[in-house]
Image (cartoon, grey):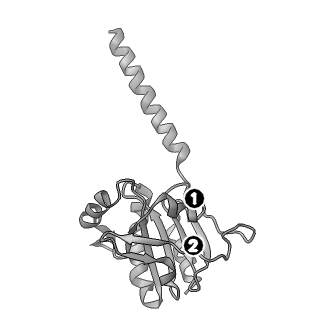
């Protein structure tokens, strides 16, 4: 009887501890960071990084000059990222013809091994249709995240102007309206 009580107490403590840690580390939907003029990234050129797609093809961020870029650091296990993905699919379809692109940077530690099956299998509800991620996905690294000042949680996105300058940082899940407002300000 005592063993059962001890086990139940330990399980309850683990559950409460996990719940508390989860609540304490979540990023609020209202946590939007606009890059202030006095920060090192404000108006600076985006780092000239090269990302590899799932086939190993390299693409440099500087190759996208002339487009408005929404650089989205995400992970397959990230629930807020899954909420945001349908909005990004819709934004890519709506604004792509106007010189806009979403670039997804998958930050999963397991890399291609988990990202490729996720992309093949997952479909997202976009206006009643089940659609795959329709924008380019690249494999990220800690080095890439550090060049953007470090990533504190996912999703974290950077809005980059047509001339390759960082305009805005979105840390954590934002409202769809906030993302659209930022993108439309650059189109």
Q: Say which residue appears at 43% left-offset and 63% top-offset.
A: 140
Question: Dot 2: what SS?
Answer: loop
Q: Is residue 166 left or right of residue 139?
A: right
Residue positioned 44% across, 74% down in the render: 103
Q: Position of residue 22 (x, y in %)?
A: 49, 43
Q: Position of residue 47 (x, y in %)?
A: 57, 72
Q: Secondary structure at mark 1?
A: loop
Name the residue tied to disc 2.
47
- Dividing the picture into quarters, in which one does residue 56 lie? bottom left
**Where does the N terminus fall, quadrant-wise?**
top left
Q: CA distance from mark 2 to mark 1?
A: 13 Å
**Residue 5 horizontal/vertical position (percent):** 37, 15
Q: Which of marks 1 and 2 precedes in the sequence?
A: 2
Tell me the tag on residue 6: none
Horizontal relation, residue 163 to residue 104: left or right: right
Res. 15 image quadrant: top left
Rendered view: 56 above or below 141: below
The reply to whether residue 30 is visible in this rendering is: yes
Residue in front for this viewpoint, 128 or 32: 32
Q: Which residue is under mark 1?
A: 150
Residue drawn at x 65%, y 68% is 34
98 versus 147 height, above or below: below
Q: Is residue 39 left or right of residue 52?
A: right
**Placement of 158 over or under 30, stated as above or below:** below
Question: Dot 1 surroundings within 10 Å: few (below 14), some, or many (20 or more)?
Answer: few
Dot in front, 2 or 1: 2
Residue at 56% over, 86% down? 162
Count of numbered tags? 2
Q: Looking at the image, is 99 positioned above or below residue 77? A: below
The reply to whether dot 2 and dot 1 touch (C-beta < 8 Å) is no
């Amino acid at each position: 009887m005592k063993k059962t009580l001890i086990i139940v107490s330990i399980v309850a403590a683990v559950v409460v501890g996990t719940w508390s840690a989860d609540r304490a580390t979540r990023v609020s939907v209202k946590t939007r960071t606009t890059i202030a003029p006095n920060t090192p990234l404000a108006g600076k050129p985006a780092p000239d990084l090269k990302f590899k797609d799932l086939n190993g093809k390299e693409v440099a961020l500087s190759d996208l000059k002339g487009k408005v870029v929404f650089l989205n650091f995400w992970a397959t296990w990230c629930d807020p990222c899954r909420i945001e993905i349908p909005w990004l699919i819709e934004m890519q379809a709506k604004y792509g013809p106007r010189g806009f692109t979403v670039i997804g940077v998958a930050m999963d530690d397991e890399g291609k091994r988990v990202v490729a099956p996720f992309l093949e299998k997952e479909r997202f509800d976009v206006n009643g249709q089940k659609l795959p991620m329709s924008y380019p996905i690249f494999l990220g690294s800690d080095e890439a995240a550090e060049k953007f000042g470090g990533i504190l949680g996912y999703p974290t996105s950077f809005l980059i102007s047509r001339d390759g300058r960082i305009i805005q940082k979105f840390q954590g899940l934002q409202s769809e309206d906030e993302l659209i407002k930022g993108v439309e300000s650059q189109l």
